[in-house]
Amino acid sequence: MTSQNESFQSSRFATQQTFYFDRKSHTYTIFKLDTAPTPKFGTIGDISIFGERRWVRLDMEWVEVQYGMEGEGARPAQTHPVYKSRIRLDFDTWKSTSNFNPQKKRKRTDTSSQGGLALASSMITPREAPILGESSNPWILDLLNQWNRFPIINLGRAHSVGESILKELLNHPLEIQKAYSGSSTLFLADQSPVFEMAPTGQRVINDLMISTASNVWDFVNRYIEPNVKASEVLASVLHAAEGTLGSESHFFGVLDIPSSDTGISSCLIKAVPFVDKSYGSLEKYGWSSTLTPVGAVSHTHMDFYGARQFMVHIQGRKLWLLWPPTTKNLEWFKMYQKERPSSDFTTESIRNLEGLQYYYLDGSKPAAFTLQSNTFHACISFSTCMHTALKVWSYDAFPESQRLMEWGLEWVRNATSIKLRDTLHEQLVTMEEEIEGWETLLKQNPRKFSENTPIKVAVKRWRDTIGKMKSSLT
């Protein structure tokens, strides 16, 4: 396994290109390497480059390119492993034989300005053009190159889904803003976590091993998988790290791992400033952690109905894509709320939601941040990742939280004819947990609030409304 890692991680650049044959597009990957390729990576028709040498990927191995011309200099000698003599390799490009002009040999272009393989403009479709440096978000290119390396490139459908998202970001017409502290409607970011013992991956695993209530998620099939043992999850995570998952394999991670005294609870993390009872209240059920394997994509979703989330990123390289819960975004999203996401749902979100921001965590140290109420978010894991979170409530967030609770109640009212009763009941229970957070805040500060205080009035009304809704579902 070590030799496989070392061989593929020597790749300095990888990009996908397309040729057209028989009225169809066909995609292949070009790898620029620091050594000769090994059979452990690549798919049929891919190209590897090491210095002046070229290899073409066959079904089970790489073969070095045949230099020279065939038929008195009329055509390149190297044919495609699938389409044979109908497609031939012209330097680094697959071309239809009918389009090959033997009188005009392509010149190589200088690669130094791009930090990698430079490609002639005739190779690039309009959607691929930003790879040559025209993107409003060139920082995505480095992430795309990471994604197209071992082990992620071997993860079948998981790789394809993440790659399409990164390419959509690369082609985004606007510059995507980072979610900086103070300037973002999404985050109170870049805080240093406060704790008595450092939260670690081992403590998250301790919680997972004793948990009986974790939500195991299949990131390929995109649904909760019941009755999966912790050992099965860990085996899946290890397989992903080795790049050995087949296209039909389960691809497990865990969305909610309750904390325990032998795990994250022992760290005594302080959710500053929400630990101040005169300012905020904390979820009574404690911390809940998430474990995602390398190559996982958590598609666009939102959590809860008004609560903020205090997050501590524990390990791994992860990209967060974030959108505010504007009226326009809520209107678009309501038809997808609590639906199983399609494999291209995050790509569609990038195209349809407004106010996109990003936050990239490189895993070099723990980081804390607060996810604002009902922020739409999608996550892409470039390595095995873990974070832990706690729902929090504070007075300053109440107006926004009230708006989002009202949106949730209206969504349940309108969904009663098309959603399963169990799904709607679960959402009403989630809303009741939200109410408990506000009730705790009120109890902590009884002198601040009269009976006619807006928070008290709203909380009482929500209790009554949810009670009636639950009764109507039975």
Image (spheres, rainbow, N blue to C red):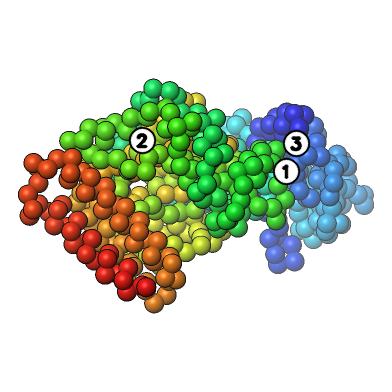
Amino acid carrying mark 2 in the image: Phe
For the residue carrying disc 3, how many other residues have a C-alpha within 10 Å: few (<14), some (14-19), or many (20+)? many
Image coordinates for residue 57, horizontal then vertical, percent: 81, 45
273, above or below 430, in the image? above
- In three-dimensional space, the C-alpha distance between marks 1 and 2, rounded to whole angstroms, equals 34 Å
For the residue carrying disc 2, how many other residues have a C-alpha within 10 Å: few (<14), some (14-19), or many (20+)? many
Q: Residue at x 50, y 48 (%)?
A: 213
Amino acid carrying mark 1 in the image: Thr
For this rendering, which residue is in front, 337 or 26? 337
Image coordinates for residue 41, horizontal then vertical, percent: 75, 41
Asked whether disc 2 touches disc 3, contact meaning CB atoms under 8 Å apart, the reply is no
The answer to which quarter of the image holds residue 107 is top right
Tag 1, which secondary structure?
A: loop
For this rendering, which residue is in front, 49 or 425? 425
239, above or below 461, in the image? above
- In three-dimensional space, the C-alpha distance between marks 3 and 1, rounded to whole angstroms, equals 24 Å
Q: Residue at x 54, y 61 (%)?
A: 342
Q: Which mark sits nearer the N-terminus, 2 or 3? A: 3
Q: Which mark is residue 49?
A: 3
211, above or below 87, in the image? above
Residue wearing tag 1:
244
